[in-house]
Image (spheres, helix red, strand yellow):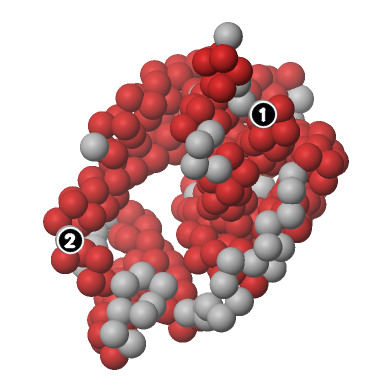
Amino acid sequence: MTDSKMTKLPKAVLTAAWAIALGAIAPMLDSTMMTIAIQQLTQTFATTLNVIQWAITGYVLALAIAVPISGWLMNHFNGKRIFIGAVIAFGITSVLAGFSWNVTSFIIFRLLQGFSAGIITPLMSTLLVKTAGPENLGRVMAIVSTPMIFGPILGPVLGGFILQVASWHWLFLINVGITLIAVPLMIHCLPNFEPFNRQSRLDGWGILMLSIMSATLIYGISKAADYATFNNGETLLWVGIGVLMAVIYVIYDWRRQHQTVLPLNLFKHGQFAVASSGLFLANIAIMGPMLILPLFFQSFRHFTAIQAALAMMPQGIGMLVTRPLIGK
């Protein structure tokens, strides 16, 4: 009886953990639901795959840019307010994306969505650690992460169902319902999180250089697909700019003695370098097919949206299986 009481999680801790997880569910589902709607979005906006793919690529880039900014925000402001504000911002940008009037506005709103998601995702883990405490961390993470890991499986299926019975607009408007439930719960259940370190500084130049490097490299490589060769002026220009920015960042990191947003001396550690390389290659193998396979199923096999979504379930299961192996 005594052991049972000792192992029982405090109700306040468990409720706060679920509130945090609920706030992060919308970005998690949104990133996987979008892949099933590429064909319909391409037809709706009368554009090409090369253009509409920036709704996904831009989302990921904006998310990556926001991650170091989220750490700076936690260092300077109340973590509870930052997290709730980011969830509200994600809900608002979801509405804007759902009512996009052309492909340009859609991509812009997706960028804003991705930036909001980039604040939410790292803060979720940080706030869970602070909420649970060292004595409850393992059990809280095990309970809360269980439904979260099913996002790669359930996201495309939910997206396919929505496209089947409604329209692509509801892929984004559904986030409003989640936001309306999550925000009051977080306001009521989450404790305040005082700033971690007000003396910390944001490496704005480093973030800017890495952002330009990533965007230009991706754009240059995408132009190579248009010409079916890397030996063309546009690809060489944009890839060259990306490589130049990488070289400038290396010099910048060296001059700042690795006090940058991405300290390059981390890669001197073998385990970090191997893990980073493994994650990079794994994401190429996993995320690439998540864009291509739905198009293949719908364009060449003439599957409906829900059929294509169900056919994507093995891909989601593969993500669940491979990620733990990569982490080792």
Disc 1: which residue: 10
Q: Position of residue 199 (x, y in %)?
A: 56, 81
Q: Nearer the viewer, residue 140 or 222?
A: 140
Residue at the spot 58% in from the left edge and 66% down from the top edge: 196
Disc 2: which residue: 269
Q: Quadrant of the C terminus?
A: top left
Q: Position of residue 163 (x, y in %)?
A: 67, 26
Quadrant housing residue 188: top right
In the picture as drawn, the residue positioned furthest to the front comes out as: 2
- Specify whether residue 218 is in view: yes
For marks 2 and 1, give the CA distance: 39 Å
Q: Position of residue 84 (x, y in %)?
A: 75, 52
Residue at the spot 45% in from the left edge and 19% down from the top edge: 313
Q: Quadrant of the N terminus?
A: top right
Quick check: 140 above or below 214? above
Q: Nearer the viewer, residue 73 or 38?
A: 73
Quick check: 151 above or below 47? above
